[in-house]
Image (spheres, rainbow, N blue to C red):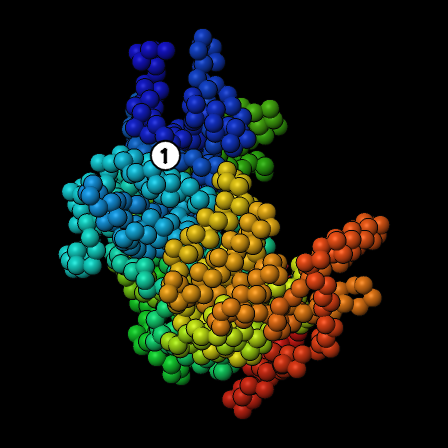
Amino acid sequence: MSETDLSPLMRQYRDIKRAHAGAILFFRVGDFYEMFYQDAEDASRLLSIALTSRDKSSADPVPLCGVPYHAASGYIAKLLKAGRTVALCEQVEDPKVVKGLIRREVVRLYTPGTLVDAELLPATEACWLAAVTASPVSPGAPQEQQLGLAALDLSTGEFRICEFDGRRAVSHLQDELSRLEPKELLLSADLPPDLSAVAAGLPGCRVCLEEGSRFDEGATHAALHKQFSTHIISRLVSETSPTGRCAAGAVLRYLYDTQPNTDLRHIHEAAVQRFSDTMRLDSMTIRNLELVRPLNDPLDAEASPRTTVLGVLDRTVTVMGSRLMRDWIIRPLVDLPTIQSRLDAVEELAQGLEPRFQIRAALKPVQDIARLTSRIAVVRASPRDVLSLKRSLLALTDLRVPLARLHSPLLRNLVGEWDSGEDLTDLIVRAVHPDAPALVRDGGIIQDGYHCEVDGLRTAMRDGKQWIAQLEARERARTGIESLKVRYNQVFGYYLEITKANLAKVPSDYIRKQTLANAERFMTPELKELEERVTGAEAKLTALEVQLFEQVLQALARHTERLQTMARRVATLDVVATLAEVATLYRYVRPEVHDGTAIHITGGRHAVIERLAQDLSFVPNDTQLDQDTHRLLILTGPNMAGKSTYLRQVALIVLMAQMGSFVPAAQAAIGLVDRIFTRVGASDNLSAGRSTFMVEMSETAHILHHATPRSLILLDEIGRGTSTYDGLSLAWAIAEFIQDTERLGARTLFATHYHEMTQLADRHPSVQNYRVSVQERDGDVLFLRKIVAGGADRSYGIHVGKLAGLPKEIVSRAQDVLRQLEQSSSSSPQFTEPVEQVSFLDPALPAPHPILEEVRQMDLFSMTPLDALNRLADLKRRLE
Ligand code: ADP
Ligand code: MG
């Protein structure tokens, strides 16, 4: 169809669509958003809505589908989830006023990384939009290339800049990206292939390849100057290089394009993050230790959240706390004083049952102040949002008293400038009606007494309605028609309805409007005049309320920084109080973190597995690792004995200690660790098209290249993916390399099924053998889960097969075969596992029940009878 054949509306559509070719265009027509052509075909499929066509009669009908305007956000969410973006095109002129074609404009582009809407965002996860840039490379020195990463969470206004250089820059960048898990990543189309590949392993991330010019220094820096104060700019200039600033500017430019005419004043700060400020965790370690996502289901954390460290620790009461908890877990610290100050704060609240209880109770009603503040700043907050902010601020007032009694520096710092925004609460109470609806267009937002014109219009409407009621009574009396009614509908406005039976009594001044099957509808000049007064007032009132509400938002938006600061404080307080709560609930102890290199753990437990084994059946184990005689621990033992669990348990205790949490152990002293590396299990990475063994070796190579003497390395069954001799030789050589201080000398736990590895201990004084003990009884094995000194010499594979339910004849045949093999090979000595007298009753274990501990800590004399009753009810509930 040629351009001239198109209707004016479709020509307007084409023009707008041309500028938003990549997005699905939601084109507002009356009460619907309509989609045409390919968009309609895609959307009808993705949204399961009917596909019809425009101009059905024409030879070439245009495919069409539509969604009602008030239900758009659910459909937008679905399209975003399917990896699409949506351009929202509104009518920007009033159709009642303008004749002919109304002007339309795209007012917002919905992309996965630029959301602020509560209904489109997961509450407990950040939503990062990131950009990556690289400095130009000089041909002689490719390793001097510098990389810049900027990330913005538009929903909270948090902006971070990070730079990487040196030989390992790309891999550091990759690690940081896997911590951030950006929802959207901007990459320049000119990046070299190894950099474009950084996005490959990111789950659920939309990659936007942009023209190189979008990252151009002049334009990106202009964006920074537009967004930030000169004070911030000069700080950025001194703390970052142009590469990092280009990435930051590219993020802002993308925002300006996708959120046109939006006030982005809630983005006023940019934090420069130094990669070396936190413990380095690469993506496989984060995955293997199941910190925030279960291994089996990396994208759907909701599926089995209890199997992750986050699932165990996140008993926060606010969503801000929940997001920060995730951040603390994936960013353990390496700076001793900061770790100590967190531990001090957690300890104070772990011991102070009363303040902890009060703080957590007071925080409960606090909503997502961080995101509410952003929605207010971009003027997309609903009346309900503003009321939520009010409720949250009121709750902050309740915190003053319990907070005033705290002493540890971190908590004192939070409390020091506690600001519960009383002035803002006052404004909201005065201006916004407590029962205001969720949508601005529904009216009834502004509180009585706030604005005299609103009050006047409301009176006029009320009186007008009363006048109409009086008119009805008068007309009934005048005409003698008892069934006469004044009614209202959208099309005719107010009218008098008379049933067929009474038509004879209708006075001559009634003007007929409409005839129905059994009634007729009439108008009178007086009713017309009253109607104009009522509906005129209504329209005026709605417009005025919208305008006043926007003014309230703007008044609140002037306090964006204050509110953001409070949001951060609330999150920190919540996380600290939660770590304290979890510590008492699960009998964690304060670790002693020091800058030596020894790690001593007594009665350590696996934070997640012990929770899954609800019945306290988890067997605690000790650990000693240091830089002399215990640098490399070789752990052997049958399958299913608990080797992998033990390895992870040590890593998790270290990680929790350095994030500032108490740890699941009877006692723990942790010599600071700069990085944790894991290579756990023979997990397949077939989706990436590489063999298991190749993956295993490249991951191991990665560890050997990046670890330092301060690192903690966990190697679980490496070398399994190839023939026995190959695998054993590799495992052997790798172990030797790691324990050698000339070459690496990192503290390492090495679980292996190669019993030959135990001979390493004879040759190297830094290597120790341990095994997980089992008891053999009547041909069955009993897993004791206890780690003891010494190496194992059999693998009990057949026993495990029997346990797993293999048919009897297979088990006994396998035993025959094994016997024959062992006899025929004289080089394979026959050892039997010494039967030990280890019982499940471990003396270190039976600590007091957490509830008993709480009761012991209760200060009865400072409680009111009501408090006491409430506490008792709470304890009872938890016991049940
Ligand atoms: P391996 O790596 O030796 O094959 P795993 O570490 O995978 O063994 O553990 C096997 C099973 O034993 C797991 O189901 C785990 O929950 C359980 N388990 C491991 N360690 C303990 C322990 N200390 N106490 C109780 N159960 C444990
Ligand atoms: Mg294992």
Q: Say which quadrant the N terminus sits in.
A: top left
Along the horizontal axis of the image, is 686 left or right of 836?
A: left
- Residue 751: horizontal and vertical position, in percent? 57, 61
Residue furthest to the bottom in view is 861
Residue 105 shows up from this direction = yes
- Residue 672: horizontal and vertical position, in percent? 40, 72
Question: Around disc 1, counting alpha carbons within 10 Å, would you say few (fewer than 14), some (14 to 19), or many (20 or more)?
Answer: many
Residue furthest to the right in view is 809
Residue furthest to the top in view is 59
- Residue 480: horizontal and vertical position, in percent? 56, 36
- Residue 366: horizontal and vertical position, in percent? 44, 65
Q: Quadrant of residue 274?
A: bottom left
**Amino acid on which the number 1 mark rests in the picture:** Ala
Q: Quadrant of residue 659?
A: bottom left
Residue at image point 48% right, 75% down: 629
Residue at image point 51% right, 53% down: 730
Query: Relative to 172, is 686 above or below?
Result: above
